[in-house]
Amino acid sequence: MSEDLKPIVPEAEEQSATVSEVAAEQPAEASVEQNAGTPETEQPIEEETIDYSNKGLKDIVDIFQELLDGDDVQKLHKHAEPLKAAFYKTLRKERIAAGAQQAVPVSEIADAVASDVEAVPVEEQPAAEEPKVSNDPFAEIERGFKELYAKFRTIRASFVAEQEKKKEENYEKKQGLIEQLKELLEKKEDVKTTFPAFRDIQAKWREIGPVAQSKAKALYDTYQHNVEMFYDYVNLNKEFRDLDFKKNLEAKTELCEKAEALADEENVVEAFRTLQKLHEEWKELGPVSKEYREEIWDRFRAATSVVNKKHQAYFDSMKGSQAENYEAKVKLCEKVEDILKQEISDSSQWNNLTKEIEAIQAEWRTIGFASKKDNQKVYERFRAACDEFFTKKRDFYSEFKGQMQDNMDKKIKLCEQAEALKDSQDWKKTSETLIDLQKQWKEIGPVSRKKSEQIWKRFRAACDEFFNNRDKVAGEQENEYSANLAAKQALIDEVNAFELGESRDENMAALKEFQTRWNAIGFVPFKAKAKVQTAFKKALDAKYDALRAAGSAERGGRRFNGAGRGERTVRSERDRLVQAFTKKEQEIATWSNNMGFFSKSKNAEALLEELNRKIDIAKQELADLENQIKDFDRQHEENDGQ
């Protein structure tokens, strides 16, 4: 089915991220500057679109397999869903092109795939069973893809579990560092001993990865509290304090430079994301000297403000187009809903409307996002309308498929009947029967496009075999006509060379023998018939004229004149009968020749029936004329003998 059936592919969910003006730092407290970066507003972050729509099924499977064989789980996760959407979209196209099945709504495909490839840890998976091989190549391709997707789900589940495990381990490690920090406070040793241990704890804290989000704030607050207590308790001497402040200033200066460089980043969204990471690093650093504290914070905050303003301006510029996008999408929804109201009764109408739906879907994909509150709602409306269309189409073709199978059964029966007649030599009757079968074939509705050409070739082969045999016999008959023509031409030469003898009876007998031999020779080619018939008549008439001339010389006088007029009357009547006989033969030959052409044309049944009727009547008239000529000759012979 070109039938291009394409249920729409769900759009990517709009993502959200925070955009903030960093809160003012309170320089007097070391902990305050480490809590900067509190979000104030939320805006969607536009995700990168990965397009595999131009890939074939094999390419998609190969890409998926290559990602599975690699070690980058995050990259695999990023590409898995676009690959799945592209695979099923392409699969539907190729199935439709091959006439294999109708399109399935995306929602049903997503549910089916999710249920078929539920992620299960490797150690919990049951022993693999021998897969059942389907005769449908598309089913086998889909089964292979599902196996790859199931493997991805398993890898992803294992990766997430591993990450959660690492976060828990990180949490335990950081708890341990907090306990070590508390122990430093309890030892009350010399600062030269405790401060290197304190710096080591800070370095280890920064090296440890993230913890679960639900535990992060409480853990961080506890850590900061103990850091502050350490600074207050140990009352670091100026040498170590200045060294610590200097290192923190260098680190924060580097972060300021990175933040300032983001102002030139073309990708506003990516710049904002990077800024969030810089804020996380800033929070992990300790305080700087009071004289630089406000200055370094103002520098970092100013760089942050530039990026935040560009980010905010980017999304503000999108708001104007979001309303237009929403209106455009609503209009497309209404177009699809109007199509649903139509009464669709045949396959061509479904195909035409499918192309309209596909064009609408293509236009939908060119329209940007609407506002967050409207985008999902209008998309669900559009998807519901498209899915309803393709569900109705699938139901129609399910019923239509049954009708096509009935048509297929009928055509198979016609093939069997034609095959039973292909070797027949009853040319006339079988020709009529096959023509009738061809007429029945045209009246039967369509069959599956995949089988249509095959069943038609079978039927046509049987019909062609019969008509080819018939034409072959007709060709042999044509050869026979050529031989008859040569025989008649030889007979004409023989008549022309015949010399009359002294016995009138012997002469008459010889001329009648020529006529008998002529009549015994069969048909000649139609184009030569009139010419050869005229030549024979002329040759024979010349001999009869010579014979009459010799008879009149013997009888003489009035008796001869009277006999001559009677003879001319007799010959004139006989010539009329012969001419009528010849004309009738020509008509029969013409009609018989035309039948071969009419049998291969459309609407030939009525023409063939009329020709057969005319030929039957003409043959009867021909037989009557032949009997009249024989009776006439017999009476003439009797009169001559008296």
Image (spheres, rainbow, N blue to C red):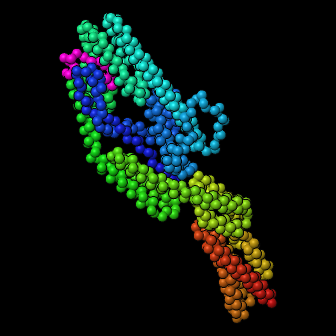
From this view, report whether residue 468 is shown above or below residue 310.
below
Task: Tell me residue 70's x, y (percent).
Answer: 49, 26
Which residue lies at the image location 74% right of the left edge and 76% below the top edge?
515
Residue 593 in sight: no
Q: Nearer the viewer, residue 447 or 164?
A: 164
Q: Nearer the viewer, residue 185 or 542?
A: 185
From this view, report whether residue 626 is shown above or below residue 128.
below
Task: Tell me residue 206's x, y (percent).
Answer: 37, 18
Q: Nearer the viewer, residue 415 or 505?
A: 415
Left or right of 257? Residue 131 is right
Inspect the magenta stretch and tell me whether residue 294 lies in it.
Answer: yes
Image quarter for residue 332?
bottom left
Left or right of 301? Residue 343 is right
Image quarter for residue 590?
bottom right
Task: Tell me residue 598's x, y (percent).
Answer: 61, 68
Q: Nearer the viewer, residue 602 or 496?
A: 602
Magenta-highlighted residues? 280-296
Inspect the magenta stretch and tell me whether residue 86 lies in it.
Answer: no
Q: What main secondary structure does the magenta stretch of the protein show?
A: helix
